[in-house]
């Protein structure tokens, strides 16, 4: 049997010792929700991804459930996990009441409800907040939900015509350079409104932001 020099064929070289760790890759979404109850939002800034699952915050008076967020640590990427974000989505929805006790299943099919939706998407802006650095992403009107029930609806009244939500819009994509979040890094998404935003007056408004990306997890084996 003849030997083969390393690099001359397709057989990879075998290491002389066992590896100390392995890398696991996958795709995942990280999402967080802000609740606007009745009150002014003009010239205000709201911080998403700061409240983890099971805790109270971000406008909620009750603990956040899996429908509102899947964060295990508020505003922080877990140690040993790196996350590269290639897309951002933003969904706007109405509750059935003007507090934190209503369900999130109200169709946006009246003039007042349509105005509540437009108030958010036409006045809101999403921005990254990396401790001491802020980077604007885009107006909410350009960051679609990427799914859900959407389209024009009518209840027989000419005034009751409008969009059920902003799900028809495409997600905001980082086409060439994803946003890298190393393990143990801190981050948040700011939802900011200009001076012309109207106050939330009718049903409470939910704004859910999802970060779509790849994770790399280091598994120590040695």
Image (cartoon, grey):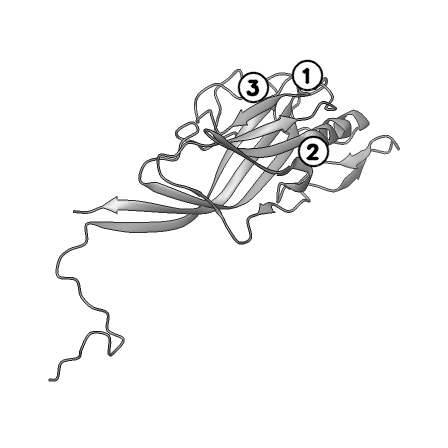
The mark nearer the N terminus, 3 or 2, is 3
Task: Return the residue at label 1.
Answer: 40
Q: Secondary structure at mark 3?
A: loop
Q: Where is residue 190, by image quadrant?
A: top right
Q: Where is residue 220, by image quadrant?
A: top left
Q: Secondary structure at mark 1?
A: loop
Binning the other alpha carbons within 10 Å of mark 2 as few (below 14), some (14 to 19) or many (20 upward) gives: many
Residues marked 1 and 2 touching at CB (< 8 Å): no
Is residue 64 left or right of 220 when viewed as pictured? Answer: right
Q: Which mark is residue 56?
A: none
Of residues 185 and 206, the one nearer the viewer is: 185
Q: Secondary structure at mark 2?
A: helix
Task: Return the residue at label 3.
Answer: 59
User: Gap between marks 3 and 2, in whole Å?
Assistant: 18 Å
Q: Where is residue 1, by image quadrant?
A: bottom left
Residue 171: x %, y % from top left: 61, 45
| Camera-side mark, 1 or 3 | 1
Residue 219: x %, y % from top left: 26, 45
> From this viewpoint, which residue is outermost toward the left?
1
Of residues 62 and 173, the one nearer the viewer is: 173
Binning the other alpha carbons within 10 Å of mark 1 as few (below 14), some (14 to 19) or many (20 upward) gives: few
Q: Please name the residue shown 44% across and 20% down the image.
A: 55
Q: Please name the residue shown 69% across and 38% down the image.
A: 141
The mark nearer the N terminus, 1 or 3, is 1
Q: Please name the residue shown 54% across and 19% down the image.
A: 60
Q: Which mark is residue 121?
A: 2
User: Gap between marks 1 and 2, in whole Å?
Assistant: 16 Å
């Amino acid at each position: 049997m003849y030997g083969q020099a390393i690099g001359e064929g397709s057989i990879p070289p075998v290491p002389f010792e066992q590896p100390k760790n392995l890398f696991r890759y996958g795709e995942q979404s990280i999402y967080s929700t802000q609740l606007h109850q009745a009150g002014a939002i003009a010239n205000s800034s709201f911080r998403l991804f700061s409240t983890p699952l099971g805790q109270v915050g971000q406008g909620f008076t009750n603990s956040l459930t899996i429908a509102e967020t899947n964060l295990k640590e508020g505003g922080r990427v877990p140690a040993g996990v790196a996350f590269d974000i290639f897309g951002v989505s933003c969904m706007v929805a109405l509750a059935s009441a003007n507090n934190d006790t209503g369900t999130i299943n109200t169709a946006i099919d009246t003039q007042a409800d349509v105005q509540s939706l437009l108030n958010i998407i036409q006045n809101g802006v999403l921005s990254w907040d990396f401790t001491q650095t802020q980077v604007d992403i885009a107006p909410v009107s350009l960051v679609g939900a990427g799914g859900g029930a959407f389209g024009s609806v009518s209840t027989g009244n000419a005034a009751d015509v409008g969009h059920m939500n902003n799900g028809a819009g495409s997600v905001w994509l980082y086409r060439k350079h994803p946003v890298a979040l190393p393990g143990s890094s801190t981050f948040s998404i700011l939802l900011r409104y200009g001076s012309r935003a109207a106050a939330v007056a009718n049903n409470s408004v939910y704004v859910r932001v999802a970060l779509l990306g790849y994770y790399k997890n280091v598994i120590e084996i040695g």
